[in-house]
Image (cartoon, rainbow, N blue to C red):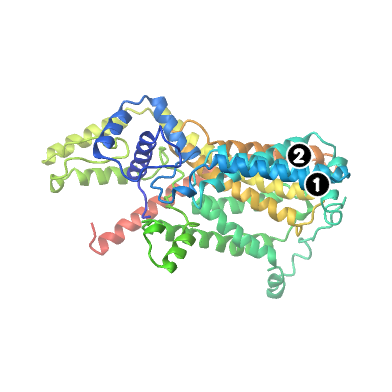
């Protein structure tokens, strides 16, 4: 999809809320492919008479329980509650009658917990919200939400156990890989003055590939180059701040700057941003698989189901006075009010979408409209605009802090419970966090930038709980294992990130102004208006 403006976003939200209004009395996953103009006119009239609370509720549903519209294969989107119930009862009957009962308590507990998790995930797929994504299928993201609930409950239960009991459970799961009490990790801060090409190349191991792929995925989720670079640099400073607790964080300067920030993380960010720009410039026109005649076309359409339905342009400063697009918007407004555009009787603006505006036909009228617009903007007090910008800085700061805390939790959990980095538990834990982060970031972004969304999405709220529980477990069980914490260093780290976030926002504004000026000069050079 091409770059979406605020107007297009508002049109999309208006269309989807109208679709929800039309299908309010039907099943959430059964949408009509066509409705009459009279029905659309009626729903539009109903939408105009909704109170602000109902409009906010509809906007919240777009990020918490998005509905699939224009369904052609209805069998894949119907709940099938009776079918699932029948299969579940048949499985329970088979398990009770034909499965041999074992006397081992450990085996019985394991089988009971496994059945509990499976039943909970089935219930999650049936009743939990879709979230902000609908590809490849909403049921996938319902199960992800169910996994996040199970993980939060598991963390809550673990928090009230003793360290010996937790290690006993881990040792029962894997007597070889999870039974260690002390972990010997590789030292990176050794002979840092010896800087050679061969030694630098020797550090390009599987973790370098992990850095590249990880930051490519992070760039796809964050979609903001400067914030990605700031988080990458901040993580190296975070390692310095917590190196007195985790010796594994100690590394040579060339390893942190050259390999991590510039090469592995840098190329990952560049690749992820390139993929974002590629997806933003595409036009998305989805065709039903039933209308495709060839087998090759059907297979291709089935594979494309696992790609994004659309791709929006992310602007973390949108909707606040920190956005640098106001002057450009005023310039576009003045152009649209010119006498050459007299035939256009309406003007769409982000502030008043769907509102008819008469087009002036003289220069004096243009100046009058410009003065009225300036007076309207001037009515907003300086305190209100400053507070709006400060709130956006705080929102970005909280986003970065939770992001860094999540990565810290991975390393501290691995160190406290003596789990080797190569163990599959570490890998699948990272995969689970990535799956939860994808809808979490989208919900948090819309919550921050859309003024009509007054509530945080449930997946975002739950992820904050998971982050707090992981940190609590690290503090409880690591208190006796780790050395004393240097509180002054942690406080300095928190303060530095606050100042750095403000600087990051300022750099974003400055860079956007430079980019817009360069684009306008380039367009004028080639004769474009």
Circle on res. 473: 2
Residue at left 82%, top 39%?
Answer: 479
Residue at the extreme bottom of the image, as rendered: 198
Residue neighbourhood size for the residue with mark 1, other residues' Cα within 10 Å, grouped as few (<14), some (14–19), many (≥20): many
Residue at screen point 50% across, 31% down:
455
The answer to which image quadrant residue 260 occupies is bottom right
Q: Is residue 496 visible?
A: no
Contact (CB < 8 A) between labels 2 and 1?
A: yes
Q: Position of residue 304 (x, y in %)?
A: 46, 60
Which residue is pictured at 42% across the width and 28% down the height?
384
Residue at the extreme left: 362
Q: Is residue 320 above or below residue 275?
A: above
**Helix, strand or loop for disc 1:** helix
495 above or below 261? above
Q: Decide if residue 81 is on the left or right side of residue 5.
A: right
Could you tell me residue 175's position as x and y percent?
86, 54
How far is mark 2 from mark 1, CA to CA?
Answer: 9 Å
Query: Which quarter of the figure is the C terminus placed in?
Result: bottom left
Q: Which mark is residue 40?
A: none
Give the SS element for disc 2: helix
Give the labeled residue for mark 1: 416
Observer-nearest residue: 444 or 36? 36
In the image, is 185 to the left or to the right of 435?
Answer: right
Residue 116 image offset from top left, x and y in percent: 71, 40
């Amino acid at each position: 999809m091409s770059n979406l403006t605020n107007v297009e976003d508002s049109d999309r939200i208006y269309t989807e809320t109208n679709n929800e209004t039309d299908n309010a009395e039907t099943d959430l996953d059964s949408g009509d492919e066509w409705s009459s103009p009279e029905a659309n006119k009626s729903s539009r009239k109903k939408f105009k008479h909704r109170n602000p609370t109902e409009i906010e509720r509809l906007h919240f549903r777009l990020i918490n329980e998005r509905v699939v519209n224009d369904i052609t294969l209805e069998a894949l989107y119907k709940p099938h509650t009776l079918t699932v119930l029948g299969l579940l009862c048949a499985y329970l009957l088979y398990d009770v009658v034909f499965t041999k009962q074992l006397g081992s308590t450990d085996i019985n507990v394991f089988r009971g917990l496994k059945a509990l998790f499976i039943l909970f995930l089935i219930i999650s797929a049936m009743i939990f919200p879709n979230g902000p994504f609908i590809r490849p299928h909403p049921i996938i993201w319902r199960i992800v939400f169910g996994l996040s609930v199970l993980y939060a409950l598991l963390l809550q239960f673990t928090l009230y156990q003793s360290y010996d009991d937790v290690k006993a459970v881990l040792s029962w799961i894997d007597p070889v890989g999870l039974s260690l009490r002390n972990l010997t990790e590789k030292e990176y801060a050794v002979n840092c003055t010896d800087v050679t090409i061969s030694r630098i190349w020797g550090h390009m191991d599987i973790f370098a590939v992990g850095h590249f792929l990880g930051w490519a995925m992070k760039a796809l989720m964050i979609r903001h180059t400067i914030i990605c670079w700031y988080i990458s640099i901040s993580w190296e400073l975070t390692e310095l701040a917590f190196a007195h607790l985790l010796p594994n964080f100690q590394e040579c300067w060339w390893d942190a700057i050259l390999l991590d920030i510039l090469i592995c993380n840098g190329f990952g960010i560049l690749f992820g941003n390139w993929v974002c720009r590629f997806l933003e410039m595409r036009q998305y026109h989805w065709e039903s698989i039933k209308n495709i005649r060839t087998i090759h076309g059907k297979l291709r359409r089935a594979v494309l189901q696992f790609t994004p339905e659309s791709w929006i342009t992310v602007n973390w400063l949108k909707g606040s006075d920190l956005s640098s697009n106001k002057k450009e918007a005023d310039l576009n407004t003045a152009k649209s009010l010119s006498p050459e555009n007299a035939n256009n009787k309406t003007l769409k603006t982000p502030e008043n979408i769907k509102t008819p505006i008469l087009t002036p036909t003289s220069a004096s009228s243009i100046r009058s409209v410009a003065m009225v617009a300036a007076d309207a903007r001037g009515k907003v007090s300086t305190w209100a605009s400053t507070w709006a910008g400060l709130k956006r800085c705080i929102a970005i700061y909280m986003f970065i802090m939770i992001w860094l805390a999540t990565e810290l939790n991975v390393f501290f959990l691995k160190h406290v419970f003596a789990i080797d980095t190569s163990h599959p538990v570490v890998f699948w834990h990272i995969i689970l966090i990535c799956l939860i982060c994808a809808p979490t970031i989208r919900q948090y972004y819309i919550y921050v930038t859309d003024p009509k969304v007054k509530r945080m999405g449930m997946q975002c709220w739950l992820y904050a709980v998971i982050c707090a529980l992981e940190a609590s477990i690290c503090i409880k069980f690591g208190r006796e294992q780790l050395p004393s914490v240097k509180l002054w260093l942690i406080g300095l780290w928190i303060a530095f990130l606050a100042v750095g976030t403000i600087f990051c926002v300022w750099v974003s504004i400055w860079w956007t102004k430079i980019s817009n000026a360069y684009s306008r000069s380039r367009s004028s050079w080639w004769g474009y208006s």
